[in-house]
Image (cartoon, rainbow, N blue to C red):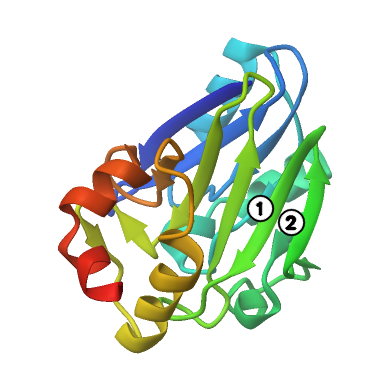
């Protein structure tokens, strides 16, 4: 599996391109402020064809470039209905359950708290690994702002049960693992 990630915009939000391999179709996750140009460069570098855009939530630092990419590549945008009104253009409803985008099976877990439409995106890799894209719900060593009770429930019910070796790809900052966060993130300790 190919995962390409980079931070863009004033808030250094992470955008990710996910594909089964180079030279294939891909999913663009969270193309935020100033993301269009780096997305184009990454698509060219890895010979990827974007098939869909998926948002972990609807804040501008995660979706500001989505409309341009939708028009440029004539691809659909998926976002949870709770955040669809933040976009300013029509999108497909990203609701709970399993979806397959660009040949990748992805489980969508709604985790309201940071926004009403925040989601976790969980994937297994062909190599046997596990990934979770957490948007602004969970970061390395921290969590997002918002309704702390709802975020705490999401951490307890959706994050803590994940296997230790799950790689966390957050909306801001460095990647981490569930094991590392379980051991060192004070917010996960409180959520237990």
Task: Please state if 124 lies on the left or on the right of 187 as rendered.
Answer: right
Residue 76 visible in rendering: no
Quarter of image, res 51: top right
In the rendered image of this protein, does residue 82 appear above or below residue 168? below
Quarter containing the C terminus = bottom left
Say above or below: 98 vs 148: above
Nearer to the camera, 51 or 74:
51
Q: Please name the residue shown 46% across and 64% down the image.
A: 60
**Mark 1 burial class by Cα count in 10 Å: few <14, some 14-19, many 20+:** many
Q: Give x and y (percent) for residue 42.
A: 55, 22
Circles 2 and 1: CB atoms closer than 8 Å:
yes
Q: Which mark is residue 54?
A: 1
Tell me, yes or no, if residue 33 can be seen here.
Answer: yes
Where is residue 35? Give x, y as percent.
Answer: 48, 41
- Point out the frontmost of discs 2 and 1: 1
> To which quarter of the image does residue 138 belong?
bottom left
- The picture places residue 68, in percent across and down from the top left corner, at 65, 49
The answer to whether residue 87 is above or below residue 131 is below
How crowded pointer 2 is (Cα within 10 Å; few <14, some 14-19, many 20+) is rated as: many
Seen at 63% across and 18% down, the residue is 127
SS state under label 2: strand
Question: Which dot marks residue 77?
Answer: 2
Left or right: 4 in relation to 43:
left
Given residues 69 and 120, the one toward you in this image is 120
The foreground one among 19 and 186 is 186
Does residue 17 lie above or below 137 as drawn? above
Residue 112: image location, x then y, percent: 51, 79
Determine which quarter of the picture holds residue 179: top left
């Amino acid at each position: 599996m190919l995962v390409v990630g980079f931070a863009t915009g004033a808030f250094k939000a992470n955008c990710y391109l996910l594909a089964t391999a180079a030279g294939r179709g891909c999913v663009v996750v969270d193309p935020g402020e100033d993301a269009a140009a780096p997305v184009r460069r990454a698509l060219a570098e890895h010979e990827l064809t974007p098939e869909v855009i998926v948002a972990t939530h609807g804040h501008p630092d995660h979706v500001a470039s989505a409309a341009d990419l939708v028009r440029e590549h004539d691809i659909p945008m998926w976002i949870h209905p709770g955040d669809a009104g933040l976009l300013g253009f029509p999108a497909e409803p990203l609701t709970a359950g399993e979806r397959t985008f660009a040949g990748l099976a992805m489980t969508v877990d709604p985790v309201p708290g940071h926004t009403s439409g925040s989601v976790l995106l969980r994937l297994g890799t062909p190599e046997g690994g596990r990934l979770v894209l957490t948007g602004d719900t969970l970061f390395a060593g921290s969590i997002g702002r918002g309704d702390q009770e709802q975020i705490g429930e999401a951490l307890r019910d959706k994050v803590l049960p994940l296997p230790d070796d799950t790689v966390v790809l957050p909306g801001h900052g460095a990647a981490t693992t569930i094991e590392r966060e379980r051991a060192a993130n004070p917010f996960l300790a409180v959520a237990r």
